[in-house]
Image (spheres, grey):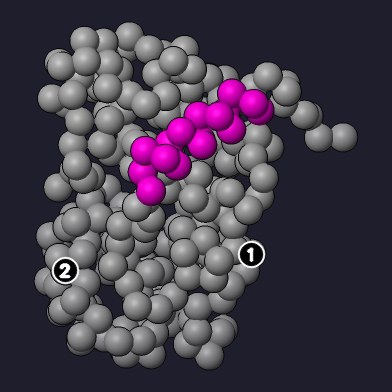
């Protein structure tokens, strides 16, 4: 039988989520994409870099290679040069060429809408799969990136043992919320992590959920000092 989280924790977590929903009504995927294939490629490129940098390189990449068949047949050196600004461009090129070939061979060039199929593609893990499922297929999923892990740990939604493992974190946080809320929960926590609850110096004094956060005081609590740390968008 699955472990049920304490009712008090469920209530506190859902209250914090409601407040974050009010604070970030525009929250959503910050990667630019027109179809599931573009989102899959952009998400793979987003590893170890920012969404803004990915969005700067994908227009040229998608103009040259609009679908899986085109990218699977691409010249490796050309792809590397196009995505170089995102960092780790050699490894990312290997993933992009591999996943594109797999899409052509196994799925007629289309991105599958199931987690089990997505995670079998080269360079695609649960985090990337959940981004694609939630934003391209409207299948609820929790995206455990560095921002998400940091916040659920600070919020006390999961313990230190759980937060050390993305899959455990995904399941533990998922148990606190209705499944239909998972995708937007991910967006709102990531937005809050990028804009307010920073890794090195969280803007505690300007945080909309500070009153329920056990980590309050990890950053400046003075409202004016904290307000100066808040950004209007994710980091460049």
Find numbered disc 2 in the image and state the secondary structure of the residue it sits on.
helix
- What residue did someone put label 1 on? 116
* Disc on res. 57: 2
Residue 66 counted in the magenta span: no
Q: Is residue 222 visible?
A: yes
State whether the magenta stretch is mostly helix, strand or loop.
helix
Residue 24 image-quadrant placement: top left
Find numbered disc 1 in the image and state the secondary structure of the residue it sits on.
helix
Q: Is residue 75 above or below residue 217?
A: below
Q: Which residues are magenta?
A: 10-25
Q: Earlier in the sequence, mark 2 or mark 1?
A: 2
Task: Name the residue nearer the viewer: 156 or 21.
Answer: 21
Residue 21 counted in the magenta span: yes
Task: Name the residue nearer the viewer: 205 or 5.
Answer: 205
10 left or right of 45 in image: right
Question: Residue 230, percent across and down?
Answer: 20, 30
Q: Work out which quarter of the rendered image holds the N terminus and state it.
A: top right
Number of numbered callouts drawn: 2
Residue at (40% x, 29% y) in the render: 150
Question: Residue 35, percent across and down?
Answer: 40, 78
Residue at (42% x, 29% y) in the render: 151
74 left or right of 133 in image: left
Q: Is residue 126 visible?
A: no
Alpha carbon of mark 2 to alpha carbon of mark 1: how far? 29 Å
204 left or right of 3 in image: left
């Amino acid at each position: 039988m699955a472990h049920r989280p304490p009712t008090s924790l469920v209530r506190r977590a859902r209250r914090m989520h409601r407040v974050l929903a009010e604070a970030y009504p525009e929250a959503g995927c910050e990667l630019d994409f027109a179809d599931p294939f573009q989102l899959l490629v952009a998400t793979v490129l987003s590893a170890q870099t920012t969404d803004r940098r990915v969005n700067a390189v994908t227009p040229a990449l998608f103009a040259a290679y609009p679908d899986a068949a085109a990218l699977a047949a691409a010249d490796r050196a050309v792809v590397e040069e196009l995505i170089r600004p995102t960092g780790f461009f050699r490894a990312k090129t290997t993933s992009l060429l591999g996943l594109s070939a797999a899409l052509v061979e196994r799925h007629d060039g289309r991105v599958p809408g199931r987690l089990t199929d997505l995670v079998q593609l080269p360079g695609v893990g649960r985090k990337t799969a959940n981004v694609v499922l939630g934003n391209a297929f409207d299948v609820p999923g929790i995206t455990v990136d560095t921002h998400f892990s940091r916040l659920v740990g600070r919020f006390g939604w999961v313990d230190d043992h759980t937060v050390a493992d993305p899959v455990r974190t995904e399941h533990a946080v998922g148990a606190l919320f209705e499944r239909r809320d998972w995708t937007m929960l991910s967006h709102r926590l990531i937005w809050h992590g990028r804009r307010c609850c920073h890794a090195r110096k969280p803007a505690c004094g300007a945080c909309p959920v500070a009153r329920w956060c056990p980590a309050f005081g990890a950053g400046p609590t003075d409202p004016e000092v904290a307000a100066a740390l808040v950004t209007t968008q994710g980091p460049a």
